[in-house]
Image (tube, grey):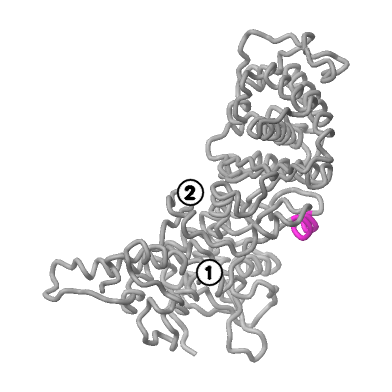
Amino acid sequence: MNILDWVNFGKVSAERDENLAEYFYDNGVLKNIISSPLSFLILGRKGAGKTAVFKYLTEKKEDFLSEKDLLVSLSFDDYNWNIHSLLQNNEKADSLSYRQSWKFIILIETIKAIRNWYIKNNKSAPKEIEKAHKLLEKLFDSPVPSIYQIIGNKLLSLSGLKLPKAGLDLEDGSFDSIELNGGEVSFEDVKKNETLQQHLSENIQNIINSLEKALQSQKESDLKVFICFDRVDEAWDDVSFDSSRRVIAGLISACDALTSQYKGFVRPIVFLREDIFEVLSLNDSNKLREDCGQLLHWNKISIQKMVLSRVNYFATTNQENTYSSLEEIFENREMRQRAKPLNYIIKRTMMRPRDLIAFLNQIISSMRDKQEDPFSDTEYTSEVIDSECIYEAEPGYSDYLKKEIIDEWGVQNPMITDLLNSLQNNSSTNFTQDDLYNELKKLKPELTETEMIEHLRFLFENSIIGFKLGQSTEWKFKCFYPAQGFISSPEYRVHEGLVRGLNLKENRE
């Protein structure tokens, strides 16, 4: 049996993996956040699997939610972020300046979801919900379009709308007093006209007040509405950094306010990169993380189970025997440092699914190269993963890991490139604080020792470097020991996964 005839580990990118629902493995983060009424944040590093969790919840809602738990999934990979800039309140803190526009989105999606549930179940929607929905139809169209369509010219048209000064009367329900402006309003029109911006903001707040009144009638209902946000970091680049940070902070603030206001009836959930959350300007961000967040973190057992579920899916699909342990698919021999093959691989990841899958895929590619070698006179087959091919795949994987880290931190901490270059220029896996300080000073002559300590802390918090504790022989990296805090150490070590990518000479102990 040649393992290359069937083995597969799936796609690195969850959004491109058509088989994800078949072998998804939940490490508990979904169950934890759904069971906690105050939680609305799922945080994780780039590659930790946030989009995989979001996608699986969207496709397999019944595995986690009841019939009366309604789900709205919003992925912002194609979204008009500029519209939010017209709704900002520059007189408020960053976390509050965009809160209004996000509350507007969440409340519209909540009203639509509730009404659709009643229609789907052949029931009459409560009159307050029905009237609120008719208001949205009057304002935007019938049927009410998707939020991606509303956040565009349809929303901009509200800047020229004449709403009753006394507010929108849902009790009346006729909305005859609403005068719709027939002409189109462009983004540039509103951007250049402060009066239009003010009208737009006032009208949106007026609509929010009306929708909130309608939802009061549902507080005693058994229904719960989960509004999930994924890929809200799509506009996260060096050009849009400042505006994106405020927009995302506004989303967090709106979710926090609505979660508290509706006591579990309206449940926004945001899937967000941990590194982005760290640089948002939020009041009590540490309390938000502790009280309202769930960290998508993997340990050695859970990440092996995640990959094993993929292996066994493809084994079953190809009529092969399944495995009880992931170690069974590897050659039974020790590698460098007397490590078993699986441990050798995991030690070179940052305990993220994307890292492990990328490394395994590189190894399989290396084995296929050996199988298809045009200059070999012998046929290559193997029933297990070849240890020599792990070595051969390591340089390519290490380059991948280096690029992932630069991509992860390039926007919010551009120093990452200089830090990696300094580690590379030091040329050794092991280094002291002075070693790195001297190399970094060549690139940043104005560097202070205080800044140097903060750079070391940053490198450790992102598992790029580790250190030993006391007389321990084990190097502590944050990805493997998440509870470990940073301490100054006489010696540091670069993560094993970056050694080849930085072309470092390994220190043997």
Q: Is residue 49 left or right of residue 254?
A: left
Mark 1 — residue? 303
Q: Is residue 236 above or below residue 469?
A: above
Mark 2 — residue? 15
Count every numbered label the image shows and give the total.
2
The answer to whether one can see residue 464 in this image is yes
* Element class at badge 2: helix
* Residue drawn at 61 percent across, 22 percent down: 143
- Residue 29 location (% of width, % of height): 65, 60
- Residue 176 location (% of width, % of height): 77, 9
- Residue 260 location (% of width, % of height): 83, 46
Stretch of the chain drawn in magenta: 285-292
The dominant secondary structure in magenta is helix
178 in magenta: no
> Would you call the spot at circle 1 few (<14 residues within 10 Å), some (14-19), or many (20 or more)?
some
Residue type at mark 2 is: Glu
Q: Is residue 338 above or below residue 152?
A: below
* Residue drawn at 80 percent across, 33 percent down: 215
**Tag shown at residue 116:** none
Q: Nearer the viewer, residue 379 or 445?
A: 379
- Residue 221 location (% of width, % of height): 80, 40
Location of residue 140 (image quadrant): top right
Residue type at mark 1 is: Ile
The answer to whether one can see residue 359 in this image is no
> Would you call the spot at circle 2 few (<14 residues within 10 Å), some (14-19), or many (20 or more)?
few
* Residue drawn at 68 percent across, 53 percent down: 277
Q: Is residue 375 above or below residue 62?
A: below
Q: Is residue 120 left or right of residue 23?
A: right
On-image quarter of the N terminus: bottom left
Q: Earlier in the sequence, mark 2 or mark 1?
A: 2
* Residue drawn at 79 percent across, 22 percent down: 202
